[in-house]
C-alpha cells in the first residue's frame, strides 16, 4: 500500500529558562492511504507535539524542529514557510483538536466557520459553500442542518460541537486527518458515537487518519496500526493485533495492564511505578529503565535499537536481544491479552 505521509527522524525541542526540553527525539513512521495509525502513550510522551509539528503549529520561539523530515506525498513540510503551510492546512492536512469549544470561534455562526475553508481552498462562491456546509453537517449527523447552520457554538451540545469540528476538518476532503484525543471531553456514549462516525466517514472519504489517544480501549476500535510513544520516542510499532496480542515492550505491558476490564472484577489494576524522565536531561540509556522491573545494566548505558519481531512489528527494548533473558509479560497483562483474544474471536464469529 502506498504511503501518503512519511516522518523521518523528527526532533522537536523547546527552549525554556531551565534549558532545552527535548520533547520529540527521533520519531519515524509512515502513514498509508486509507489507514488509521493510533499514537498512544501517557501525558508528556510527545504525542501532541509530534502531530503539531506535522501541521507546522509548533510556536517559534520557544519551539523548533531541530531536524527531520515530514514528507506529505514526497514534499517536505519542514522546509515550507508559513504561507506555503497555510495552503496545505485544511486542504491536504487537517486536524481535530481535543476541546471543540476552544476549537470553534464563539462569535461566528458554525456555517460561516465551515464555509471559510471551502471559500479559501476550494474557491467556492458563498452560495456554493453554504450548500456544501449544509451537506457536511448532515453527513456528520446533525439534525435539521439548514437551520443549525445559522447557530453559534454555544447553542450546540459537546458532542454536536465535536461533530461540527469534524465537519470543518473534512470540508476540503483532506488526504490526512489528525485527531488529537477528539473524544476526551465527551461522555462514553457520545464518545462511541463520534468514533463510529469517524470510521464511517473514513470509509466514505478514504482519508488517512492519525489518531492520538492515551486510551487503549479506543485504539482497539479505530486503529489499523499502533505506535506506542514514551519520553519523546516511539518504543513499539505494529498492527493492532501485534500490540494487543503480542506486546513486546515493558511500557506497552504497563499500558495494557492498567486497562480496566469488566470480565475480571477481582484482579487489581496494574500501575506503572515512577514518573517519566525529565526531558531537559534525557537519560543516557533506555528512558524507561528507571520504571522497568526487567531493566538490565545495558538499559542504563545504551538506548536500544528497534528489533524486528515480525514483518509488521518492531520494538525498542534490549529484552529482544538474542543474549537477553527470556521474560514473560506480567500475569495481569497476559489475562488482558487472553481477554482480547476471546473478544476478537467472538466478534469474528458474529461477523461470519
Image (spheres, grey):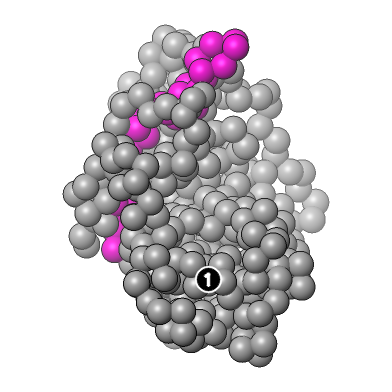
- Front residue (pair 240, 67): 67
**Please, what is the dominant secondary structure of the magenta stretch?**
strand
State the residue position of label 1.
114
- x, y percentage for residue 303? 39, 19
Q: Which quadrant holds residue 159? A: bottom right
Q: Residue furthest right?
A: 266
Q: Secondary structure at mark 1?
A: helix
> Is residue 174 in view from this perspective?
no
In the rendered structure, does residue 28 fall within the stretch colored magenta? yes
- x, y percentage for residue 272? 66, 32
Q: Which residues are magenta?
A: 5-33
Q: Residue at x 46, y 24 (%)?
A: 13
Q: Residue at x 38, y 77 (%)?
A: 124
- Front residue (pair 126, 221): 126
Q: Which quadrant holds residue 326? A: top left
170 sits to left or right of 103: left
Q: Residue at x 52, y 45 (%)?
A: 40
- Front residue (pair 101, 207): 101
Q: Residue at x 80, y 51 (%)?
A: 266
Dividing the image into 4 quarters, which one contains the C terminus?
bottom left
Q: Is residue 126 above or below residue 310?
A: below
Dividing the image into 4 quarters, which one contains the N terminus?
bottom left
In the rendered structure, does residue 248 fall within the stretch colored magenta? no
Q: Is residue 153 above or below residue 37?
A: below
66 sits to left or right of 261: left
Q: Which quadrant holds residue 196? A: bottom right
Amino acid at each position: 500500500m502506498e504511503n501518503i505521509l512519511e516522518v523521518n527522524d523528527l526532533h522537536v525541542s523547546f527552549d525554556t529558562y531551565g534549558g532545552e526540553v527535548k520533547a520529540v527525539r527521533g520519531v519515524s513512521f509512515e502513514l498509508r492511504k486509507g489507514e488509521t495509525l493510533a499514537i498512544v502513550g501517557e501525558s508528556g510522551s510527545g504525542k501532541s507535539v509530534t502531530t503539531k509539528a506535522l501541521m507546522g503549529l509548533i510556536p517559534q520561539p520557544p519551539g523548533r524542529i531541530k531536524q527531520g523530515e515530514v514528507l506529505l506525498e514526497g514534499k517536505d513540510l519542514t522546509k515550507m514557510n508559513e504561507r506555503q503551510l497555510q495552503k496545505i492546512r485544511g486542504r491536504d492536512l487537517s486536524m481535530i483538536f481535543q476541546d471543540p469549544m476552544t476549537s470553534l470561534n464563539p462569535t461566528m455562526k458554525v456555517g460561516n466557520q465551515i464555509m471559510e475553508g471551502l471559500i479559501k481552498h476550494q474557491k467556492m462562491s458563498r452560495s456554493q459553500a453554504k450548500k456544501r456546509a449544509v451537506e457536511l453537517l448532515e453527513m456528520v449527523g446533525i439534525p435539521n442542518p439548514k437551520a443549525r447552520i445559522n447557530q453559534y457554538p454555544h447553542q450546540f451540545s459537546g458532542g454536536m460541537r465535536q461533530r461540527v469540528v469534524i465537519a470543518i476538518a473534512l470540508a476540503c476532503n483532506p488526504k490526512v486527518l489528525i485527531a488529537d484525543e477528539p473524544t476526551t471531553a465527551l461522555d462514553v456514549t457520545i464518545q462511541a458515537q463520534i468514533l463510529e462516525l469517524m470510521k464511517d466517514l473514513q470509509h466514505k472519504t478514504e482519508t488517512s487518519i492519525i489518531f492520538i489517544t492515551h486510551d487503549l480501549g479506543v485504539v482497539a476500535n479505530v486503529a489499523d496500526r499502533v505506535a506506542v510513544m514514551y519520553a519523546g520516542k516511539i518504543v513499539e510499532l505494529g498492527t493492532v493485533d501485534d500490540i494487543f496480542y503480542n506486546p513486546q515492550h515493558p511500557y506497552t505491558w504497563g499500558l495494557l495492564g492498567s486497562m480496566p476490564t469488566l470480565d475480571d472484577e477481582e484482579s487489581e489494576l496494574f500501575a506503572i511505578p515512577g514518573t517519566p524522565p525529565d526531558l531537559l536531561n534525557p537519560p543516557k540509556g533506555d528512558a524507561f529503565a528507571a520504571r522497568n522491573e526487567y531493566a538490565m545494566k545495558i538499559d542504563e548505558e545504551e538506548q536500544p535499537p528497534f528489533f524486528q519481531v515480525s514483518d509488521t512489528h518492531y520494538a525498542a527494548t534490549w529484552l529482544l536481544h538474542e543474549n537477553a533473558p527470556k521474560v514473560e509479560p506480567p500475569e495481569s497483562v497476559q489475562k488482558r491479552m487472553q481477554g482480547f483474544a476471546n473478544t476478537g474471536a467472538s466478534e469474528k464469529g458474529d461477523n461470519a
